[in-house]
Structure formats: structure tokens, C-alpha cells
Image: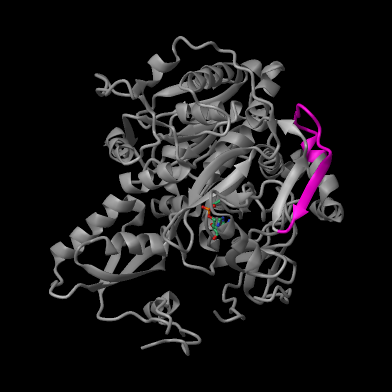
């Protein structure tokens, strides 16, 4: 790709923090706090770590064997202990940990003490099924509190969880279960989506049929009469735990013990199992939640993510619980039963921190400002955005619709980074559309392909120059793939994003450099979608690109070559879409499919997606000297 990417976006508005925001903030002066933190990153991170509880202390903060990092070497800890026991020992015992609202408005309120007991029962249940430290459990649940309970229960005894988003189809789930060699799958009968009931259990049935490592399936039955279970492999969640004791000692784990595997899309078809560990991840998610959202004990924190994605792991479950926060989480979509849904929840529960996505903001924008105006949003004080670049228009709308004086934290990070990396803090002056500056202790830059720093307003690759505690430790069973993150650009972690810095050092993310598409903030590899397309009997070859889309950020457009003798028809296109739906689930289905007679390829046979994209968008395709045809 061309080195000097034009930066077309010109945005000059700057928003200063209000007196109120400033008065409350932990970090009053970002510039000096940042300078101090990167003058001695190990000192900075070890001071953060000391705010948490460790069973035994570390002997070394960082051991860096490029590109392999170990943080808090020699220490033992447990992230679930820090999420629960640390608070249950204090006045927070009876503080509300989770307010959960179902799509049908059912409400469950769980205190730290109650969450502690539920997690312990579940941990004992896991032990009873024979699960041991290091074993893997796949959690395929809709957004219900049991999802959080199961994650923490695994963590408590050193079992590694792999949460799979419940919108994934059976083959995608099977693939993830098999790669992790999970012994147990935890699931539910059904989930709800915009008033429709979707059957989750049947997806698991299909996936488990091809996954010989699975010994048990625990089913949370939400409907009556309950779905039939095929014993003894299948167990009802409540039967499983009703006799379990509410005490289960947290395992003392090495700081580097794996906490979870989370599968994410990359540039090849096979999803990558990103591995995070107890110690460093705990430190990173704890401090970013605290400083970015300026989280205090009296806040009500609402993050709209699903724990099926990394945002849910880090900013619904671990980060907020480590801080002893009160978390609101709601099943369902922002416009169901009407576009006032989230504003209503904010009013109803007095939400003060609201973390959402550009896709959702753009969706709500379409319904107009009258919806937020109907509700009292005065409790809000900090807003957040994540998952894709937020366009200035959506930023301005969000800012206006929520009362004009609430700072928006545009947080840039990745499944691989574990925690927020580039972000404002509430006292940092904001420029709509910019994720602003690096978080404390993080050294970020924009470089060319050789790793040279680029001047202001020149597009290049976003990189991180030093290891950080919450970074992934490896790709599960694929260390070579892990290395590519640190090999692509000399001496740096290459994020795969294109970015530029402005004259104030503010970072502006411009999208992906590789073949990852972001649909509604969710990562999809082009290769994954292509392989689903060619699994259709009529498709010979396929290439997909992401196309800018007003609402969901990017939409998927597919170019396919049909097998000889196949004839294009409306029914055929539909059956190809159905095939992708079956293979990947709804998020993978292309919104457009074009039948073509050839695809642009390099001489070595690689599809040149950027040529397709440039053509589609009417842009200059750049260097095409390697093209075959
Ligand atoms: C994109 C989600 C611009 C980016 C936490 C990154 C963003 C990918 C932002 C990771 C943001 C995330 N501004 N782009 N604030 N946040 N991205 O692993 O392309 O699902 O590389 O993690 O999302 O996606 P992932």
C-alpha cells in the first residue's frame, strides 16, 4: 500500500473540559502524568499493580524477550479474587455489582456479596465436573448474568474461558470449541433479539456433535416448560449448582497463568485465539477503567457491549468489577421496543457513565434528537465510544443529544491489546473524531513500514513501541502468528490500523491496513467470509471488501465467480447468502453480491482486494504493477 496516505479529514473544533469534569477527575494534568509514566513505565505499572491484591509479590516487573513479555514475574494472584473478595471484605459487600435488564424488562439486581456466592457455587460445580486448572470451557450464552458468573468461576479456579458470541453459527462455534479443545460448554436454551426468540441450544447441539473433547453441556433454561435435556452429558444450570457450597477458595495462580482465549478475526480464514493472562490484564483493565471513565463508587456504569466480544470482557466484566463499580447491563438492541430504550435505561437507573459504539450512535441519530430529549439524562457525566472510528458528525450528535457538557472518551484498542491504549482522559481537550493521546504508560506512534516516525498529518501505521501489561501473550497454539504482530514493523507492535497525528500530537485513526472488515464494530476477516462463500456449491471463487456504510461503519460487498454451468439468479444469490448465514451467522452475510468473470490477482495468485475496493469506491488503485490480469 502507498506510504503517504492523504488525510482528508479536517476537523478543527476543540472542546475543553468543564469545571465540573475537572473538579472530579483523578488525573488533573495529563501532560505531566504521561511524561512521568513513560519516563519509567515499569515504575508506573508497578505502582498501579500495588492498588490490587497479590498473594505473593513479584520479583521483577517486566521480563522482555522480544517479542515475548512476562509481567509481574514470580507473583501469584487471581483476577476473580480481585473482582470479588477484595470488595466483599469491605463495605462494598452489599453494594450493587450488577443491574441486569432483560429485553422484556425483567430486572435482576446482584450485590457483590451475592455475585461472590454465585461465582463460588459455579466454581465448585466446575470442579465437580472434573475441570482443573488449565482446562478450557466454552461459554456460549446470551447476555445474561450467568455469562459473567461463569467467566469469573472459571477464573477463580484457573480454568481458561473461551466466550463465543451467541450470534455465531454452529460451524463457527464448533471451530472455536475444537481449537480450544473445550471439555465443557455452557449455554442457554434461547436468547432474545428485538422481540424474537432465537434458539441457541440447537446451535450448540450441532457444534458439539462434531467436538469430541466436550464431556458436558450445561444449559441455562430460561423458558418454561424447559427444553428437554439428553442426559447424562447435558445438565440443567440450576440442578448443577443448587447443592454447591457458596465458598470456594480462589486458586493462587502465577501472574502469567492464562485467563482466557478470545477468538478474533485476522487476515486468514482461521480465527485467532488471543490469550490473556491474570496478572497483567488485571492491572491494565483496572487502571484504564478507573482513569478513562473517572470511575467513582457512586457511579452507575453502563456499557452496551456483549461479553462475547473483548469490550464486554474488559469493560463490562473485569475492569468495572476490579474497581468495585455498579454495572448496568441490558439484553437487547438500542431501538427495541423503541429508539428511546437506552435513554430510558439511563433515566431509570441514574446512569452516570455510558460506554457505547459509533454504530449504535449512528443508528440512534437516524431516529432524531426528540428521543433523547424525552428523558432526563442529567445524571450522565462521562461518555465513551469504541470499536471503530467515530465520525465527527456522530460525535457532535452524541455530545448534543446528551446535554453538551459531557466529555466523550473515544477509546482505541483491540482484542490483542486487552485494554484501552489511545484515549482521552476526562480532562484532556477533545477534538471530535480523534482518539486523542496514548494512555499513561503507553508509547504510541505513527510510522512508515520501516518503523520511522512520520511527521504531522502524514498517514502511516499505528504502532506501540514498548510492551504493556495487558498485551496478549500469544495466539493459542500458534506462536508464529503471534510473532507477526511484532515482526511486521521493526521493533514495534503493529496494530494493523492506519492513522495520522496532527500538529498537537493527537491521533486520528483512519481504518485498517489489512483485510479486516469492521461491521458494526465487530471484526470479520475477509478470508473468513470468502471461505463461507466458496463453501456454496455454485461458487468457484470469492473476494470480499469492506465498503464505507453510513450506519454500520463498513458493509460487506462480495465479488464471486460462479462455477461453470451455474446461472445467475435472484434465488441463487439468496441461497449463497443463506449459506454464509449458516456458516458464520448474520454478521458475516454480504449486503451486496456481484457476479464477475475474473478477479484481480497478483502473479502469485493472491486476490488484490484493494484494487477491487478502489474500483468500487472510484479511487486510484495505487501500484498495480504486480497484477496478473
Ligand atoms: C478498530 C475492539 C478507531 C481498530 C475494542 C482496531 C477503532 C479494531 C477504535 C479492533 C476507535 C477500535 N477508533 N478505530 N476508538 N476502537 N477500533 O479487536 O481498527 O474488536 O484495530 O477490539 O477496531 O477491534 P476489536
> Residue 44: x percent and y percent?
82, 46
Q: Residue at x 25, y 81 (%)?
A: 597
- Does residue 47 appear anywhere in the picture? yes
Q: Which residue is drawn at 69% across and 26% down?
A: 252
Q: Which residue is drawn at 43% across and 50% down?
A: 364
Question: In the rendered structure, does residue 517 fall within the stretch colored magenta?
Answer: no
Task: Locate residue 182: give its quadrant.
Answer: top left
Q: Name the colouring of the figure.
A: one colour
Where does ligand 1 appear, by image quarter?
Answer: bottom right
- Does residue 299 appear anywhere in the picture? no
Q: Quadrant of the C terminus?
A: bottom left
Task: Locate residue 505: give its quadrant.
Answer: bottom right
> Residue 374: x percent and y percent?
45, 39
* Residue 237 versus residue 15 in the image, above or below: above
Provide the residue span drawn in magenta: 47-66
> Residue 387: x percent and y percent?
53, 53
The residue nearer to you, when weighing 49 against 230, is 230
* Residue 545 versus residue 435 in the image, above or below: below
Amino acid at each position: 500500500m502507498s506510504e503517504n496516505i492523504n488525510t482528508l479529514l479536517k476537523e478543527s473544533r476543540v472542546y475543553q473540559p468543564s469545571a465540573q469534569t475537572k473538579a472530579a477527575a483523578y488525573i488533573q494534568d495529563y501532560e505531566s502524568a504521561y511524561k512521568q509514566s513513560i519516563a519509567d513505565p515499569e515504575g508506573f505499572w508497578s505502582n498501579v499493580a500495588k492498588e490490587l491484591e497479590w498473594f505473593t509479590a513479584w520479583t521483577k516487573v517486566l521480563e522482555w524477550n522480544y517479542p515475548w513479555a512476562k509481567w509481574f514475574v514470580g507473583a501469584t494472584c487471581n483476577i476473580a479474587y480481585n473482582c470479588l473478595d477484595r470488595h466483599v471484605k469491605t463495605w462494598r459487600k452489599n453494594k450493587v455489582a450488577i443491574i441486569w435488564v432483560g429485553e422484556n424488562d425483567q430486572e435482576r439486581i446482584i450485590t457483590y456479596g451475592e455475585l461472590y456466592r454465585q461465582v463460588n457455587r459455579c466454581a465448585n460445580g466446575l470442579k465437580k465436573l472434573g475441570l482443573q486448572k488449565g482446562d478450557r470451557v466454552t461459554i456460549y450464552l446470551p447476555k445474561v448474568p450467568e455469562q459473567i458468573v461463569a467467566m469469573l468461576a472459571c477464573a477463580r479456579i484457573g480454568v481458561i474461558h473461551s466466550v463465543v458470541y451467541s450470534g455465531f453459527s454452529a460451524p463457527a462455534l464448533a471451530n472455536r470449541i475444537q481449537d480450544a479443545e473445550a471439555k465443557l460448554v455452557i449455554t442457554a436454551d434461547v436468547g432474545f433479539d428485538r422481540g424474537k426468540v432465537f434458539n441457541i441450544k440447537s446451535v450448540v447441539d450441532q457444534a458439539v456433535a462434531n467436538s469430541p473433547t466436550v464431556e458436558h453441556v450445561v444449559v441455562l433454561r430460561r423458558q418454561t416448560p424447559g427444553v428437554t435435556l439428553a442426559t447424562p452429558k447435558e445438565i440443567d444450570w440450576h440442578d448443577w449448582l443448587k447443592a454447591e457450597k457458596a465458598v470456594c477458595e480462589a486458586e493462587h495462580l502465577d501472574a502469567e497463568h492464562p485467563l482466557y482465549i478470545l477468538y478474533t478475526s485476522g487476515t486468514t480464514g482461521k480465527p485467532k485465539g488471543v490469550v490473556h493472562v491474570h496478572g497483567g490484564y488485571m492491572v491494565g483493565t483496572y487502571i484504564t477503567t478507573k482513569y478513562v471513565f473517572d470511575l467513582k463508587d457512586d457511579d452507575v456504569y453502563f456499557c452496551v457491549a456483549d461479553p462475547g466480544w473483548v469490550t464486554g470482557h474488559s469493560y463490562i466484566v473485569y475492569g468495572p468489577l476490579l474497581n468495585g463499580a455498579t454495572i448496568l447491563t441490558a439484553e437487547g438492541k438500542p431501538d427495541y421496543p423503541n429508539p428511546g430504550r437506552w435513554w430510558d435505561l439511563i433515566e431509570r437507573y441514574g446512569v452516570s457513565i455510558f460506554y457505547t459504539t459509533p454504530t449504535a450512535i449512528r443508528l440512534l441519530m437516524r431516529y432524531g434528537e426528540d428521543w433523547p430529549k424525552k428523558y432526563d439524562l442529567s445524571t450522565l457525566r462521562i461518555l465513551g465510544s469504541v470499536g471503530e472510528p467515530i465520525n465527527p458528525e456522530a460525535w457532535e450528535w452524541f455530545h448534543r443529544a446528551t446535554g453538551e457538557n459531557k466529555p466523550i472518551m473515544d477509546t482505541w484498542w483491540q482484542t490483542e491489546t486487552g485494554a484501552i491504549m489511545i484515549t482521552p482522559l476526562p480532562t484532556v481537550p477533545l477534538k471530535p473524531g480523534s482518539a486523542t493521546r496514548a494512555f499513561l504508560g503507553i508509547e504510541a506512534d505513527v510510522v512508515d513500514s520501516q518503523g520511522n516516525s512520520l511527521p504531522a498529518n502524514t498517514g502511516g501505521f499505528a504502532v506501540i513501541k514498548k510492551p504493556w501489561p495487558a498485551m496478549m501473550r500469544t495466539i493459542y497454539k500458534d506462536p508464529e502468528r503471534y510473532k507477526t504482530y511484532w515482526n511486521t514493523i521493526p521493533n514495534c507492535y503493529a496494530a494493523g490500523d492506519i492513522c495520522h497525528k496532527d500538529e498537537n500530537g493527537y491521533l486520528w485513526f483512519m481504518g485498517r491496513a489489512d483485510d479486516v472488515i469492521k461491521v458494526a464494530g465487530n471484526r470479520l476477516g475477509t478470508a473468513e467470509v470468502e471461505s463461507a462463500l466458496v463453501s456454496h456449491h455454485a461458487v468457484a471463487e470469492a473476494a470480499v471488501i469492506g465498503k464505507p456504510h453510513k450506519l454500520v461503519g463498513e458493509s460487506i460487498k462480495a465479488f464471486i465467480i460462479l462455477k461453470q454451468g451455474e446461472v445467475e439468479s435472484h434465488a441463487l444469490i439468496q441461497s449463497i447468502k443463506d449459506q454464509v448465514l449458516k456458516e458464520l451467522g448474520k454478521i458475516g452475510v454480504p449486503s451486496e453480491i456481484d457476479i464477475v468473470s475474473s478477479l484481480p490477482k497478483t502473479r502469485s495468485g493472491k486476490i488484490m482486494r484493494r484494487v477491487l475496493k478502489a474500483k468500487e469506491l472510484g479511487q486510484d488503485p495505487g501500484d498495480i504493477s504486480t497484477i496478473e490480469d
